[in-house]
Image (cartoon, grey):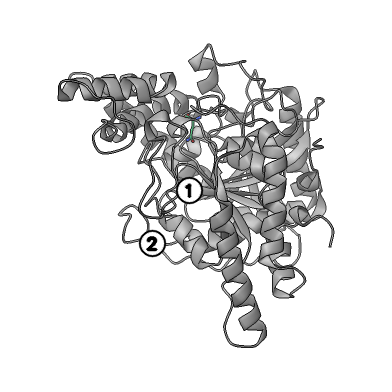
């Protein structure tokens, strides 16, 4: 066996079952690679080697028992996993990239993670994120940014930047992320990996630290669409602990079979190919669509006319919901407390010291948008326009099966490029926000590289609860192309 860290989830699972490797060997290989590359790329905020080796040991016992014919095997037994540090894992520190939760240890585990533990996975650590998932570069992490393995002078994207880096640099075969406005898809695109933002309500949010509750989703980043689908299959479904999770059957996703796209109608929305987009991004995305056409798909123009409103609508709704969700960090119940003479001063000092500048900005924006006299003009109006954006998608999906578009206007940008101008940073999200506002699923995957050698991503968006369609298309594309197999050269 060559380098074990090169194995995909599927390959690792199969090698474990055949007894060619043990979970302890596999896990140790990833932990050693983490030790080597963490100082350089910083994808992790917390490492859990003891937990990982204990889980790996238990997996090996189960594998041995199964070989003696004693038990059935959980579907992802013994395969390592990294978890974004906004998802609770019982007894493991959960910082959300914030000083205010620096020492917070949750007593319970997020449902999405529980499903993967039940499936036999091994947790190697918690990954870096912009503070409370607010950002597009990991530069808003209170613990310092992660670096893009394709060019350490560039950001990995965000907010699930740590997860994208961990997967792209083979420090984990797969990682969980969250996507409220693009935070799985954009870092997946910047780091050249594949990532799903599920339909809102498809995967339980229980145990995900809330940012924008009507937008938050839990997703997966891996090297292939097939690997992403393997985890998604385990995580999806109704959860009594999340009232917004949908009680719908989760179809068994089967990606085997021909790589033909015959009969598939791909919509190309003109509103996503606007001025200012990096020419190579447009070129690679169009080329990928052409490849899909040559595989049998029909390509049709579609219009999503309210796309331009997604940015202002999102940056009202998300901060409004965040301002309410973050009220709980008051120095009393969780995390950091700064002592003072009276209660109000404890609140002020704890929040003043615990939150970073971007989080404070959003709390102020959101509080303003929700305040008496402004509620209808801002939050109420934004909700109405949100409905129009959702209708755009519903109408488009009358005529096409999926919509294909760029993930972001450019490839990975350099550190500091947007830090002085919050609006410039928000503009990075123009193409990812609509799917969150509409609640539809989106899948990002690599379709080329720009002249500087940075990955370019495409996103497919589909009708509500049709994730399996997106996986099928991306898997077919990955059968005939090799962008997803490229690996960054690391010292
Ligand atoms: N970049 C967007 C923001 O800053 C989206 C973040 C996310 O999806 N969590 O809000």
Residue visible at 40% across and 38% down in the picture = 103
Rendered image: mark on residue 384:
none
Query: Given contact means CB atoms under 8 Å apart, are the residues at marks 1 and 2 in contact?
Result: no
Q: Report if residue 81 is visible in the image.
A: yes
Residue visible at 66% across and 58% down in the picture = 27
Q: Report if residue 268 is visible in the image.
A: no
Mark before the other along the chain sequence, 1 or 2: 1
Whole-percent x, y for residue 284 in the image: 76, 34
Helix, strand or loop status at disc 2: loop
Whole-percent x, y for residue 276 in the image: 65, 18
Helix, strand or loop status at disc 1: strand
Does 80 sit left or right of 118 as displayed? Answer: right
Location of the N terminus by quadrant is bottom right
Question: What residue would you read off at disc 2?
Answer: 238
Question: What residue would you read off at disc 1?
Answer: 218
Question: Crowding near pointer 2: few (<14 within 10 Å), some, many (20+)?
Answer: some
Some atom of ligand 1 lies within 8 Å of the CB belonging to the residue at label 1:
no
Question: Crowding near pointer 1: few (<14 within 10 Å), some, many (20+)?
Answer: many
Does 239 sit left or right of 93 as displayed? Answer: left
User: Which of the 4 image quadrants contains residue 69?
Assistant: bottom right
Is label 1 or label 2 in front?
1
Whole-percent x, y for residue 450 in the image: 78, 28
Name the one closer to the observer, 159 or 126.
126
Name the one closer to the observer, 350 or 340.
340
Task: Single out the residue that lies furthest toward the left.
Answer: 342
Location of the C terminus by quadrant is top right
Residue visible at 43% across and 33% down in the picture = 132
Task: Single out the residue that lies furthest toward the right.
Answer: 2
Whole-percent x, y for residue 114 in the image: 45, 60
User: Which of the 4 image quadrants contains residue 411?
Assistant: top right
Above or below, 141 relative to 462: above
């Amino acid at each position: 066996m060559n380098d074990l860290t090169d194995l995909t989830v599927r390959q690792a699972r199969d090698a474990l079952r055949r007894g060619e490797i043990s979970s302890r060997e596999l896990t140790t290989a990833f932990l050693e690679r983490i030790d080597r590359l963490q100082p350089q790329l910083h994808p992790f905020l917390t490492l859990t080697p003891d937990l990982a080796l204990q889980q790996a040991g238990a997996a090996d016992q189960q594998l041995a028992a199964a070989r003696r014919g004693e038990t059935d095997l959980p579907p992802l037994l013994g395969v390592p996993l990294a978890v974004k540090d906004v998802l609770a894992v019982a007894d493991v520190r959960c910082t959300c990239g914030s000083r205010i939760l620096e020492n917070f240890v949750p007593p319970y585990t997020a449902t999405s993670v529980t499903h993967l533990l039940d499936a036999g996975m091994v947790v190697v650590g918690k990954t870096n994120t912009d503070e409370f998932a607010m950002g597009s570069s990991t530069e808003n992490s209170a613990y310092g940014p992660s670096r893009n393995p394709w060019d350490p002078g560039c950001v990995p994207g965000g907010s699930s930047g740590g997860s994208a880096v961990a997967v792209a640099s083979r420090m984990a075969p797969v990682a969980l992320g969250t996507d409220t406005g693009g935070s799985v898809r954009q870092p997946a695109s910047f780091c050249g990996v594949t990532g799903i933002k599920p339909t809102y309500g498809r995967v339980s949010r229980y145990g995900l630290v809330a940012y924008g509750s009507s937008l938050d989703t839990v997703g997966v980043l891996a090297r292939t669409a097939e690997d992403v689908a393997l985890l998604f299959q385990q995580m999806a479904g109704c959860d009594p602990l999340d009232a917004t999770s949908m009680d719908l059957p989760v179809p068994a996703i089967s990606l085997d079979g021909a790589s033909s796209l015959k009969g598939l109608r791909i919509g190309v929305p003109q509103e996503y190919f606007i001025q200012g987009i990096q020419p190579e991004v447009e070129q690679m995305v169009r080329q990928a669509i052409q490849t899909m056409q040559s595989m049998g798909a029909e390509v049709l123009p579609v219009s999503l006319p309210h796309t331009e409103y997604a940015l202002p609508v999102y940056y009202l709704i998300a901060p409004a919901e965040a301002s309410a969700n973050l009220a709980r960090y008051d120095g009393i119940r969780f995390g950091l407390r700064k002592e003072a003479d009276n209660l109000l001063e404890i609140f002020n000092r704890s929040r003043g010291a615990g939150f970073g500048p971007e989080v404070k900005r959003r709390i102020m924006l959101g509080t303003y948008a929700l305040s008496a006299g402004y509620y209808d003009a801002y939050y109420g109006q934004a909700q109405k326009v949100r409905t129009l954006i959702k209708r755009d998608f519903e109408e488009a999906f009358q005529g096409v099966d999926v919509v294909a578009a760029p993930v972001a206007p450019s490839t990975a940008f350099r550190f500091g490029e947007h830090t002085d101008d919050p609006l410039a940073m928000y503009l990075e999200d123009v193409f990812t926000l609509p799917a969150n506002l509409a609640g539809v699923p989106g899948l990002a995957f690599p379709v080329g590289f720009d002249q500087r050698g940075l990955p370019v991503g495409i996103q497919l968006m589909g009708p509500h609860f049709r994730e399996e369609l997106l996986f099928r298309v991306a898997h077919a594309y990955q059968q005939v192309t090799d962008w997803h197999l490229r690996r960054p050269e690391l010292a």
